[in-house]
Amino acid sequence: MRSRRIGAGLLALLLGTATAQAAETWGVAFVHGTGRQQQADRDYWQPMIIERLRGGLAEPHNVLVVNCDFSQYAWTPAAAGCLAGQLAGFIEERGITHLAVITHSHGGNMMRWLLSNPTYDRRYPPIIQRLHTVVALAPSSAGTPLADAVMDGNRFESVLGWLLGYRNDAVRMQQVSHMAVYNALWLYGTAGRPALPRPFRAVVGTGVQSAPWHAGSACGGYALNLGLAFTRAWLGGCSDGFLHCNSQRAAGTEWFADRARTRGGLPLSHNQSRRDCFGLGAILRETLPP
Amino acid sequence: MRLPVLLMLSAVSGAAATAPAHVMQTLRIHPGDRVPSTLVAAPLPADDSERTPLAFAWALDPGRPLQPPGVQTAVSRGYSLQVDAAALRRGVALPLTAAEALIQVSPAPGARALPGNALQLRGATGQPVPVRSAAAQTLLPDGVGVPTGTHVLRTGTHVAGLHALYATPARGRYVVQVMEPLSPLWLELQAPRTTLLAGGTTTVRARLHDDAAASGAPRAGVAGPYGQALLVAPDGRSWPQPLHPDTNGRLQVQVRVPAEGSALPGLWELQVFTGAAGVLRDGRVAFAVAQPTARLSGQAAADPLRRRIVLPVQVAAPGRYEVRGTLYATGRDGQPRPVAQGHAAAWVGTPGNTTLVLGFGTVPLPPGFSAPYELRDLQLHDQSRLAPLESRAAPLRF
């Protein structure tokens, strides 16, 4: 009799567990970096990494590739407003209960804006409620001196002022001194600040492989890797060619640095960290339930 | 340690909040708190502010202490020059202090885009210096963008010193930016505040460091720093700011932000341009400027049972206003630690007095934590104008 009660209890537990799992509907959203995207699945991410994540979903249609204008300031309707609209629509249309968001570069800042300012837009809280994890690939959490270089190149005035001949507010935002202020006032998750309401896990790119005879230099495009090898000199030390490692580690927690997990222990340049290079796609599937 | 996160979403009518019958307490003021003394009826920017009142709170890890932001520090090992075509044809003097320098040349609107092979760097003897050259558009990620025709030169391991940059086919104006990541000479800027109220002041300090001197090998001739500074608004307006030497060999600038602020969102910058005996260094610090459209009344009614704080607010201009703060609870050791973060916002269409309510009651306390509570890092924000209006480090204990 006792063994029958135990068996019944175990069965109830298993059924309960199965019921709970059946109630979970997982989805994955890809959030691009700086710039305006209209076909990010093709142009920014390319299909391979998207398909890797899709293959890990019980419902393969539950994939969203966001297309927004991230050349604007984060809080604008075209940026965070667009992001919130697409995420909210995806969640509602698909009945998503658990959302994993994969970001690249400035896309990490976009999700941190949403997570850090939950009362800014009524769409933000329901998104946060269903958000399981943000995996931030090479996030520009503390900005980059290269953004300063771009802005310096656009400053013209007879008295060393500022002529607005070229606007990219997102690049302006990612200047090192600007991100320091945004992190102090409006963005959580950096050292000494309140934690974000959801896990923000950074994947850090630590180098650029540009030797033409090395297999690691071709993935993602050799020419782009060659350029990033050039810009590494601007940054010095550990970087992915666009972002210093310290900037990538500045917010949330570090999930892993590239060489610790990639196939062959190869580094992920800033371009490669948005592509299915060296097994990255398979690693990201760990974000989803088995 | 992963904590369970509990979210609270509730409709809070800021204007019509029914406050519990708790005694109003005076909010404490500490040195460094920012409290507006007067309010202004600033115009409302694009009217796309959220109208729904919202409140939200989540758990924090009490084992992870929080720290208030310290002095903002910026470091620079570079400088920029504006040059015209005639100067590039004659040769623009570029002092270099280290190997592996990067030189970016950007054409102004209307200037001729220079081919990479048109740029030549020569050393003190007039001999060409071998450099690597690349078009900047091939170096930076998609979407970042640089002016068409921007080129980057990278010097090698040659000896530092006074060089000259030539571009014979130049026409128009150009910005030449020099970055020396390996230089022992660097500019440090310190700004004590990340936020100013419009009309307010702050002092920024600049110091040129020489690592070679620190190691006991002082650089001959590096003395007497000089410079100028420029305050730049988000809308592009700028104001020269005089730099003055202090008694410690540093420069400082007293920055006063115009009372009218800026109609455009974004951060203000103080750009500093310095030099000392053959060394040029530029840097910048950024900060937020807020027109004081609202302020806390200075009182609050706190309910320790419900962990709920009612905050009266005085509003001078229509907009969406938010309060945010960190709840500290007392642990078994008697020490207060952070346990929850809360935000509450509401649209205020008519200037006057209103209330906002910070609620932490739906966030479970960690085991072993209880009252008394403290509210720390209380902030009032104007969300419509993206302006941090008021901040109080430790205003309330209940």
Image (tube, grey):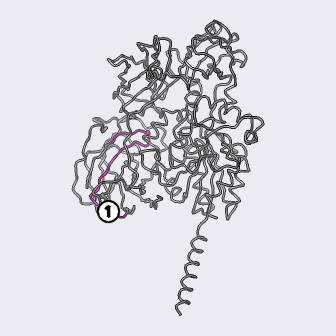
Q: Please tell me whether residue B210 is drawn above or below residue A13 in the rendered image.
A: above
Q: Which residues are magenta?
A: B367-391
- Please, is residue B237 above or below residue B4 in the view? above
Residue B190 at x, y percent in the picture: 40, 28
In the rendered view, tell whether residue A40 sits above or below residue B83.
below
Q: Which residue is mark 1?
A: B306
- Viewed as shown, does residue A160 lie left or right of A283? left
Mark 1: which amino acid?
Answer: Arg
**Front-most of A65 and B130?**
B130
Identify the element where label 1 is drawn.
loop
What is the chief secondary structure element of the magenta stretch? Answer: strand
Chain bearing tag 1 is: B
Residue toward you, A81 or A60: A60
Residue placed furthest toward the front = B216
Q: Residue at x 65, y 22 (%)?
A: B154
Outermost right residue: A213
Residue A207: in magenta span: no
